[in-house]
Amino acid sequence: MASMRANALLEAALQLKGTGWHVVSSNFGGKPAQMEIVMEHDRVDLRCPACEAQCPGYDAVEKRWRHLNFFQYRCELVAKVPRVNCPRHGVRLSEVPWASAESGFTLLFEAMVMLLAAEMPVSDVAQMVDEEDTRLWRLIRRLVDRAHAEKDWSEVKAIAIDETSARRGRSYVTVVMDMDTRAVLYLGPGRDSNAVRSFCEQLQAHGGDPATIRWVAMDMLHCYAKGVRENFPNAQIVYDRYHVMVMAGEAVDEVRRKMQRNGAQLKGSLWVLRGNHWNLSAEQQLQRATLAKTYKPIGRALALRSALQDVYGASKADGAELLRCWCRWAARSRLEPFKKLAQTIRQYWNGIVSYFDSRLTQGAIEAINGIIQLAKRRARGFRNFLYLRTIAYWNTGKLNIDTSAILPT
Ligand SMILES: [Zn+2]
């Protein structure tokens, strides 16, 4: 493809008009066959990359970039990039419009890799685009780290903290999420107050102020509370409604298991008793009502759970008082699991009733956990925590990496 017309076509496709760059040749060659597009600069208007002042040329350095495939051909751009001699900044390589400095990929290729990495394991992306996976990881980490560092956290007021396993049953990581934007802000090793301190340091590095953190949602089982008290002076801990309801569900289950051990005919009743009645079929609802009538303790357990659900629907003015009533009822219920639940609620009272002020629920972070488990699979073969974090930030961090150029509009 040596004709002027082919060069003009490629120039248009690469959007070089007005940039001073021209396609001088293109060819197919090598084994396996690949396409090479050679470009030159007209050297009329050379500028320093640091101050954008017009500067005299110094020399030129040949560079190569991997570009989007041309049909089935792997495609590379080749150009002698002018170096300028800036009076203020010395000899500098000038910028090219199709790639960022120091990258061996064009911007379009980078955008495509980022889109693919959001959808499939990086090892699969590497196979698909025929590149070393370590090279792609370097690219992905560079773009994600930069976009993450640029995020402004000064508006963050409410966060949720939770843990997730980084490797099967072994190491744990702490996840912090902004409850307003639902973006994952932080992923760090460990699950204790040190993780909270480390997040606090990052918050400040991103322009945030620990004093503006008003609410922190978490579940009762973790040791994050100490870290929150130490690092966020104005934060109120919110023990999550979601976790309290999970405990109530477990209490119903325990009542059922105990009755079964004592000879009650409850085989197959597990799913009928679990969850909210509006999720059951008409037949299951009838079964549940019959069980509740036949086995009084099960009836009481179901009533207690559904009453607790109602308490969470109460207004800010009534919430705490209703919860107090509920605890008294549970304590007298003659159902050990519910007596224990009432004790737990009393033990964590302030954190639990603060839900009625904040209405913060951690359900979202549970969903994020699912995404992070997915990120783990995406980073497969790369056991390092940094790989997991990179993919998790890319999938859930709401980062600003522009991939629009290769998406259909
Ligand atoms: Zn300069």
Image: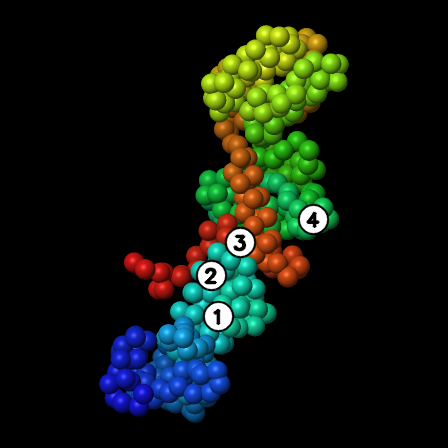
Query: At 70% across and 43% down in the image, what residue appears?
Result: 192
* Disc with the residue nearer the chain's start (1 vs 4): 1
Q: Which of the numbered marks, if any, corresponds to residue 367?
A: none
Asked which secondary structure carries label 4, the reply is loop
The residue identified by callout 1 is 129
Q: Residue furthest left?
A: 5
* Disc with the residue nearer the chain's start (2 vs 4): 2
Asked which secondary structure carries label 3, the reply is helix
Q: Is mark 3 within 8 Å of ligand 1?
A: no
* Disc with the residue nearer the chain's start (2 vs 3): 2
Q: Amino acid at mark 3?
A: Tyr
Circles 2 and 1: CB distance less than 8 Å?
yes
* Disc with the residue nearer the chain's start (4 vs 3): 4
Question: Residue 89 in the image: x percent, y percent?
Answer: 46, 81
Between circles 2 and 3, the one closer to the viewer is 2
As measured in the structure, the alpha-carbon distance from the residue carrying label 2 to the one carrying label 1 is 10 Å
